[in-house]
Image: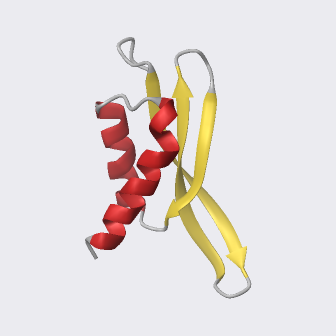
Amino acid sequence: MKSSEKYRYNVFEESFTLPELGPYRTYGIKLTSSSGKIKYISDISTDKSNVDDIAANFNKYQLSPIHFGEAVDDAIALLEYCK
């Protein structure tokens, strides 16, 4: 974590299996704060570049952890709207 950052958002990969879909790979975001607190949001998208872009913006603007869940929901809604 850079000294000027209070929060760091990193993309992580997971694998899941659902009866109706079978196995699939998906990406989530892990939040680490300068105080050592960690939060995860799993299974955001199967498109890594979308999740990379979301995490990059969260890092750039130092999104407060209070808004983490809501901001991910908004980003997913925007991705769906732009399809």
Residue 67 screen position, x and y as percent: 46, 37
Q: Residue at x 32, y 63 (%)?
A: 78
Q: Residue furthest bottom?
A: 20
Is 2 left, or right, of 61 in this rendering? right
Is 55 left, or right, of 24 in this rendering? left
Establish if 17 lies above or below 32.
Answer: below
Q: Residue furthest right?
A: 19
Residue 13 screen position, x and y as percent: 57, 55
Q: Residue furthest top?
A: 3
Number of residue marks: 0
Quadrant in which the C terminus is drawn: bottom left
Q: Residue at x 58, y 15 (%)?
A: 35
Q: Residue at x 31, y 41 (%)?
A: 57
Is 57 left, or right, of 16 in this rendering? left
Residue 24 screen position, x and y as percent: 60, 74
**Nearer to me, 16 or 65:** 65
Q: Quadrant of residue 80?
A: bottom left
Establish if 33 lies above or below 43.
Answer: above
Quadrant in which the N terminus is drawn: top left
Residue 62 screen position, x and y as percent: 36, 28
Q: Residue at x 60, y 54 (%)?
A: 42
**Nearer to me, 38 or 11:** 38
Q: How is the image coloured?
A: secondary structure
